Image: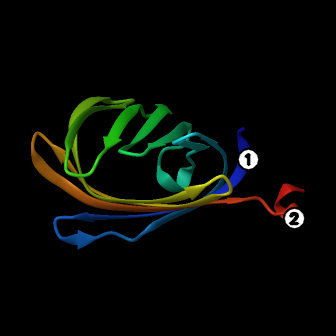
Amino acid sequence: MEKEVLISIKSTQSVGGEEAEPTELITLGNYACRGGLRKFSYMESAITGLEGTKTEFLIRPDEIVMNRTGMVTSRMVFSKGKKHRFLYGTPYGTLAMGINTNFIDVFLNEQGGSLDLGYDLDFENALLSRNQISITIKEKSEKEKA
């Protein structure tokens, strides 16, 4: 069963050894659990620079898939110890990129929980950035539902 939840996302990015200011987003989204699969989605905002894009995470026991559709399109696969290639579509063109997952920590149940993800992003095998994402999912309180 899918339900509306409050999703808190904090991401940091290190480019050339210098860490940028963390980006934080708190938004409403949808969350569902079925067997070993967890799924949540939300709409990006101007804060992330991806306004008009829907982001969806599919969490399986051995991998996480992040799909983006809208202004930006991509299908990023995270699995520890494996490098994956993906296409990153923007209004200005499409780039072939790579992702190497450093760590995945998932603590999700039917009510919500947390997800921590660390990965390196590359373009033509040259490191672009080191990234960390921390996501918290929780059921909306009665006050937030009103």
48 and 41: which is toward the camera:
41
Q: Which residue is mark 2?
A: 143
Q: Residue at x 85, y 55 (%)?
A: 145
Please provide percent x and percent y for residue 72: 43, 34
Disc 2 on helix, strand or loop? helix
x and y percent of residue 1 in the render?
72, 38
Q: State whether residue 26 is above or below residue 45.
A: below
Please state which of residues 2 and 91 is positioned toward the viewer in this rendering: 2
Residue 132 located left or right of residue 109:
left
Residue at x 57% of width, y 39% of height? 35
Residue topped by disc 1:
4
Name of the residue lying farthest toward the left: 125
List the single residue furthest toward the front.
Answer: 35
The image quadrant of residue 98 is top left
The x and y percentages for residue 53 are 53, 37
Which quadrant holds residue 25?
bottom right
Please name whichever residue, 51 or 26, is drawn nearer the observer in this view of the structure. Answer: 26
Number of marks: 2
- Going by the numbered disc 1, the residue's amino acid type is Glu
Q: Left or right? Give the position of 99 relative to 105.
A: left
Instruction: Tell me the crowding category of disc 1: few under 14, some 14 to 19, or many 20 or more residues within 10 angstroms, Cα based.
Output: some
Tell me: residue 81, above or below residue 143: above
Confirm whether residue 71 shows in the render.
no
Answer few, some or many: residues within 10 Å of disc 2's Cα (few below 14, many 20 plus, some between 14 and 19): few
Secondary element under disc 1, as helix, strand or loop, is: strand
What kind of colouring is applied to the model shown? rainbow
Q: Where is 120 relative to 53, above or below?
A: below
Q: Earlier in the sequence, mark 1 or mark 2?
A: 1
Question: Residue 93 appears at what percent x and percent y?
Answer: 30, 27
Q: Are marks 1 and 2 in contact (CB under 8 Å)?
A: no
Report the amino acid beneath label 2: Lys
Image quadrant assignment for residue 85 = top left
